[in-house]
Image: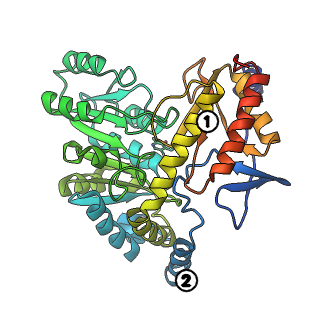
Amino acid sequence: MDWIEEELDGLADASIKRSLRTYSAVSDSAGRMMRGDNMLLNLSSNDYLGLARHPAIIEAMREALLTEGAGSGASRLVTGNRLPYSRLEEELADWQSCEAGLVFANGYMANSGVISGLVNRGDVVFSDQLNHASIVDGVILSRAEHARYRHNDMEHLRALLTKFRHKRRKLIVTDAIFSMDGDAAPLRELAAIKREYGAMLMVDEAHSGGIYGRRGEGLCHELGIQDDVDIHMGTFSKSFGIYGAYICGSRTLIQWLVNKARPLIYSTALPPSIVAGISKAMDLVQTDHWRRERLYEASRLFRSLLRAAGFTIDDGDSPIIPVIVGDNDIALRFSSALEEKGIAAAAIRPPTVPDGTARIRFSLSAVHTVQELTDAASHIRIIGQQLGVLVRP
Ligand code: PMP
């Protein structure tokens, strides 16, 4: 096993070794957490709507815990499919305006299970180069041809669709909002291309669910192209503040996945308390519009503060805002310096992002205040100058 240590040393030398850090919650503050004795403003959480500590969700989970017990005891197809599941899946289908919905244990299992359940040898998946790792792994598991198109490059996608036109089944898959860049996929164009080439379209709304759409359904609904999407995927771990994931689509699709999605078939069902908590969160996601409004305002404010400080920041209102520094070691130093100022913001390095694009990925929440964001931006500016990331004085 000596090779492992050598390889780990290699990762450390390249500033890409990862290690776990431990945080604890601050009971009265959703936007903060503790590391040891240090209170940190959490600018690296996906709890976008600030629901993770919502008392009504916690109460729903507690009630289900007491009535249904700690675990589901089996996979869904055996005896783990408890009442909260059927309730949630009905709500899910209604929320997404689809015939049916299916809950998965998490987004990784949903993506990997659905893609590998839908396509096989002889098929082809057209996947954006910046799609999430769970999509990449699903394609690899499926054994289908992996046709990766350059990020959001529709001309490249068309060229690949033409090249692989002889393949049996064609699946186009994209994140709606890209997890490390916070930019959006050209969903209207993708919907048109999918029709033109007779392909299936799958959209991962992990970072757009709860945030866009009249009832927080996601970016596809916001843009009105939801009916062109054959496979709607989203998570309950981000805007919903809990854990889990879903697929929505036609009844036939869901029946197929119940038969073919291996992570659903061969893994224990989520604890009923989690599923009950998701149902409560779904009520809040649909009705607490102010959380979305607050999040857009926070995103616009933070983007403008960072831009005024001299960073290159894209337009937009998604809560994911990267400051790209390029070098892995600088990203690590940036993140440590922020922590010394009471800000938790993760350094994201390859292979999570392409080589030479290491970054601090800020992600905002509806619970962050204007004061917190203004103070944070000022620390970010000073540290950016100290590290030479910002050349402007
Ligand atoms: N898709 C995307 C775009 C993601 O960013 C993530 C997780 N960060 C996932 C899927 C996986 O979701 P989960 O964390 O529920 O496994």
For disc 1, the marked residue is: 305
Q: Nearer the viewer, mark 2 or mark 1?
A: 1
For the N terminus, the image quarter is top right
- Which of the labelled discs sits on residue 287, or is there none? none
> Above or below — where is 110 with respect to 198?
below
Amino acid type, residue under disc 2 in the picture: Leu
For disc 2, the marked residue is: 66
Q: Is residue 82 visible?
A: no
Q: Give the color scheme: rainbow, by chain, secondary structure or one colour.
A: rainbow
Q: Residue at x 51, y 41 (%)?
A: 300
Identify the secondary structure beneath mark 2. helix
* In the image: residue 12, left or right of residue 105: right
Residue that lies at the very extreme toward the right in this rendered image:
37
* In the image: residue 88, left or right of residue 274: left
> Above or below — where is 69 with respect to 314?
below
Q: Position of residue 6 (x, y in %)?
A: 76, 22
Q: Position of residue 267 (x, y in %)?
A: 45, 57
* In the image: residue 327, left or right of residue 122: right
Q: Quadrant of residue 361?
A: top right
Crowd band around label 2 with a 10 angstrom C-alpha radius: few (<14), some (14–19), many (20+)? few
Q: Position of residue 330 (x, y in %)?
A: 73, 23
Q: Residue at x 30, y 17 (%)?
A: 156
Between residues 259 and 63, which one lies in front from this camera angle? 63
Between residues 132 and 223, which one lies in front from this camera angle? 223
